[in-house]
Image (cartoon, rainbow, N blue to C red):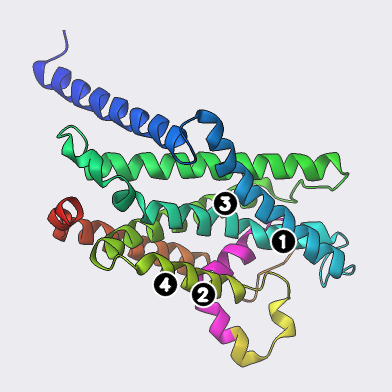
Amino acid sequence: MPSAQSQTLAGILRLRVNVILALILRDMRTRFGRSHLGYLIAIGWPLAHLVSIVGVAAFINKVMPLGTDPAIFVATGALPYILCLYPARMIGQAIVSNKPLFLFPIVTVFDVMASRILIEFITAFIVVIIFGSGLYVLGVDIVPLDATVAMSAILATVFFSISVGVLSTVITSIFPFWGIGFVVIMVLLYGFAGVFVLPTSLSQGMRELMWYNPLFHCVEWIRSAYYEGYGDDMLSRSYLLWSAATALLLGLLGERFVRGKLLLS
């Protein structure tokens, strides 16, 4: 027979899972309106953004600086935007937007953050799947040369997004208007991530500045799965992972120090 301790642990885990699932369902229903159909807006918004970026850029630049299909070149650059900026921004608002729920003792900070992380990446991957399926139907070859590299790049981008989102949650609890600054910073980082240009076409000084941008390495890593030899000169997987780990550590430590403020401010 299982010990009382193991039964207690199983009960705690089951309770936390049930709370997180309830928070996910609540988020899906209340994000836009009072119906589950409102969740379609949460999917359609970033999907429309992604389609616009790729469509406009591919139309303007008939000849891409790499490869033969402009849609692939732009899409591999735009993908980190969907997998990083949107989820990280919404994760950063998790505590502020769900503060009334802490009136219920059963709901913890971890539950709210975990539920928001899960719903945001479910949404992000739905967007990516729909967009990829659309490209495939239009005759675009979306299969990467190395599927393992593509998957590892996507997971690394997700890891970075979660880490930045957790850190942003803590900062937002101290500086309520941080959300605006966060969007500005992320857009600037994305603007200097080499989405529409090859780094080799830029000056040495610009390339050195871009190297310190973690989103740049997200783009380079994803593109390295589609173009043989791409990123060999500038891509640093370790820098991206260490940046993500550092942001996550700072976020978790910050949550411990300001937990009372998160719940009472």
Q: Nearer the viewer, mark 2 or mark 4?
A: 4
The residue beneath circle 4 is: 181
**Tag shown at residue 213:** 2
Residue type at the position of mark 3: Ile
The crowding category of the residue bearing disc 4, from other C-alpha atoms within 10 Å (few below 14, some 14 to 19, many at least 20), is: few
Q: Quadrant of residue 234?
A: bottom right
The residue beneath circle 1 is: 53
**Tag shown at residue 154:** 3
| Residue 227 visible from this viewpoint | no
| Circle nearer the N terminus (3, 2) | 3
Q: Nearer the viewer, mark 3 or mark 4?
A: 4
| Circle nearer the N terminus (2, 1) | 1
**Gap between marks 1 and 4, in whole Å?**
22 Å
Q: Is residue 239 left or right of residue 52?
A: left
Q: Secondary structure at mark 4?
A: helix
Question: Which residue is at a point 64% across and 56% down the rendered structure image?
Answer: 79
**Which residue is more in the foreground, 77 or 149?**
77
| Circle nearer the N terminus (3, 1) | 1
| Circle nearer the N terminus (2, 4) | 4
**Gap between marks 3 and 2, in whole Å?**
17 Å
**Which residue is more in the foreground, 193 or 111?**
111
Which portion, as a residue range, is magenta?
Answer: 208-227
**Gap between marks 2 and 1, in whole Å?**
21 Å
Residue type at the position of mark 4: Gly
Q: Nearer the viewer, mark 2 or mark 1?
A: 1
Question: Which residue is at a point 66% across and 69% down the rendered structure image?
Answer: 231
